Image (cartoon, rainbow, N blue to C red):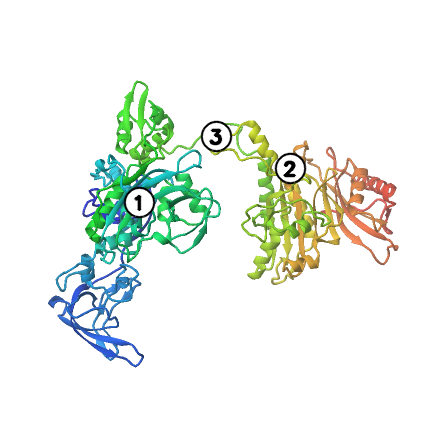
Amino acid sequence: MRVPLSWLREYVDVPADATADDVLAALVSVGFEEEDVHRFELEGPIVVGEVKEFTPEPQSNGKTIRWCQVDVGEEHGGVRGIVCGAGNFFEGDKVVVTLPGSVLPGPFPIAARKTYGHVSDGMIASAKELGLGSEHSGILRLVDLGIDAPVGSDAIALLGLDDIAVEINVTPDRGYALSLRGVAREYSHATGAVFRDPGAGHDAARDRTPQGFPITVDDVAPIRGRVGASQFVARIVRDVDPSRPTPPWMITRLSLAGIRSLGVLIDITNYVMLELGQPIHGYDLDRLQGGITVRRATVGEKLETLDGQVRTLHDEDLLITDESGPIGLAGVMGGGPTEMSDATRNVLIEAATFDQVSIARTARRHKLPSEASRRFERGVDPLVAFVAAERVASLMVELAGGSLDTEVGGSLAETFARDAIVLPSGFVSGLIGVEYTDDEVERALRLIGCTVERRETGWSVVAPSWRPDLTDKWTLAEEVARIEGYDRIPSVLPTPPSGRGLTSAQQGRRRVSNTLAAAGFVETPSFPFTTAEQNDLHGSPSGETLPSVKLANPLDGLAPFLRRSLVPGLLQVAHRNLSRGIVDLALFEAGTVFLPKPGVQYGTASVPPLAVRPDAATLTALDASIPPQRRHVAVLLTGNLVPKQPGQAAVAADLADAVDAVRILAGAAGVDVELVQAQRAALHPGRTARVRVAGADVGYVGELLPTVAAGADLPGRVLVAELDLDALLESAQNRVVVASLSGFPAATQDVSVVVPVGTAAGDVRAALLEGGAPLIEGARLVDDYRGTGVAGGTKSLTFALRFRAADRTLTAAEASDAKLAGVAVAAERFGAALRDGEQSAGAEVPGR
């Protein structure tokens, strides 16, 4: 909300020497947020000049300029020669002259310069150049504004261009502050300055019997049982002159408030809306057919709104209609056929109170936010409509030369009244944490306009009509805290109760993400939306079509499905980075995937009403209507893992690095994983493995097929892994690991065994660990050799073994015996044999 200070001073006593920062500080103290300060960005000398004479001079380019002699006053150099391209002024006209040294918005500095064969000693300004509107077809003639000022006088002050506006952010619950009336009241609360309510008075108008122009409210399908229009006030002004100029003071205030001038009739309605917070609409009375009816739209009805758009209406839309049909979207925007124009002579003024929910839904449904809907959806004072209609009518009589009909048109659908709120003694202090006296509580509530009645156990409070947000004792307590000052509320760090904090699952998810980040991966959250093709390719092992959740109203029509895998999102992120020259990537994401079960219909539960807490049965039905959502974690590697540098060749990421990432995140989750060679539709058949924990599949790791990588516009090798993070953490919770650290040194040996080429290295490792127990502590594959010296159809697997005892230092013989026991198990299961040259006892390898 932009608030011109000259306008604010009409309703509250702002000190003459108060700056914009002073006003903002006062408003911030009562809960508003400071946004900006707006000025006309003009610097003088800008003065009133009189055109003494001019000479038209045709130019070779077809344009005719005027060489003018303009009197700007003796104190500014008397008569000056000025070149002007406009032709809408006459000798004797008084105009606005920007003299050399002045600056117009832009900034556009003015200087004497040679043009069209003359030295132009200044410039005659248009309204647009001064920031007074969008009119730029000709210069600004003061006679059009009804102004006759002395030559040489300051035009900036004359036109109100020295005014300043402060801008504050108004939260949705404080719609009353979208008006000068509301902001002035709040400034009064902050400073104690005297407030003069522009919405007071005209009480007699509320008592006048509706007559004359017929108004009907016929809402047969109210939303939530609330009639769309609780009241509708109309006034008729006849014989207006829409060609009359809008006064400069009104134009400058509207401009500073962010609204451009559109002619005196529309300017008046906008001015009163800003002044009182009541949206106003004016109709060309002669274009109306019969009376006005407020009703809901019927399916298929159409309306051309003021922006020129023909809109298909919804049966929830609240309409203003006459006998011809819809003439306006109530509370949002009027219709084109009945709008006020330069030909309007008789005006019907509408000031109504519309239902907040109805207006909010209509504005969002048609993507048509307006200044009117912004106020109605936040709540407009239902008692100000009468005052606003009278105010618009009086201004049209004063500024547009009209005459007010004595008859009143209006329809009241309901009588406005607010229920009393019981506020117990001590409640405010207990909630806010500040000891407020009873007098302070009463004073604060009366100050904001509440009617307060003292009771034995507290107060009975009736909130004012302009505060629909005050509905219970909690909102009243917040108002007391705001008025008495937030600075009174102490800053106290709460002490958390023991036993609280992150759950074990939350700790596990955080630990996995932190570990991957520490290992050099970058977390890149992505949107959970994808295509059916990507879901089939990455969301199922063999690429078959599995059920996916399709959104009814997707953000992107090309990606209407919820993801079954995190990999498509990582591929998009990788492509975006590669397109910007970042070619070495190690990415990960931890997020939710959506895995509906075949044959189950989801989303069938009815949505409970917003104002009622759902019961247990309703919550159970809602949960059942949602597909399973598992948390996964996925990684992607492409490019170089180690960049080229002095003394170090580049090291490209390969499958071993993706496997290492799987082991890293499994270790962070607290589980041991097993890799088993497998196949997936999107992955290279010889470079893919299933990841297993305790015999159950929890994910996969592998290299993308070159065709899949190319389809994602990713050159080179792309390694991916995706694991079910929930399954990892659930497995970790089921494990009880209690181990002591031995203080004795480890013995290390290598072993090379020859096995059939189809034997998995992981199975051989498991056999070595089983046979070498309890002395063997670890086994790591260090070589897989196939070639000279190894029989065809076999391979040589070399493992680095580590042995340790809890109670002694092992000898080399003890380590060798444990190693051979492991080899014996491998021989029994897979026909493993020690490779030629392998020592039966083995040699201790220190430091491995």
Mark 1 is on which residue type? Glu
Residue 557 or residue 48, whichever sits in front: 557
Q: Could you say which quadrant of the image residue 44 lies in?
A: bottom left
Q: Nearer the viewer, mark 3 or mark 2?
A: 3
Q: Could you say which quadrant of the image residue 60 lies in?
A: bottom left
Residue 202 or residue 530, whichever sits in front: 202
Mark 2 is on which residue type? Leu
Q: Give the alpha-carbon distance from disc 2 to disc 1, as whole Å.
A: 64 Å
Give the residue number, with chain letter if any, for mark 3: 612
Q: Residues within 10 Å of mark 2 (few under 14, many from 20)?
A: many
Give the residue number, with chain letter if any, for mark 1: 350
Q: Residues within 10 Å of mark 1 (few under 14, many from 20)?
A: many
The answer to whether residue 634 is left or right of residue 355 is right
Farthest left residue in view: 74
Q: Give the alpha-carbon distance from disc 3 to disc 2, as whole Å.
A: 36 Å
- Percent across and percent down for residue 627 are 62, 39
Q: Nearer the viewer, mark 3 or mark 1?
A: 1
Task: Assess whether mark 2 and mark 3 are in contact (beta carbons under 8 angstroms).
Answer: no
Mark 3 is on which residue type? Val
Q: Which mark is residue 637?
A: none
Give the residue number, with chain letter if any, for mark 2: 729
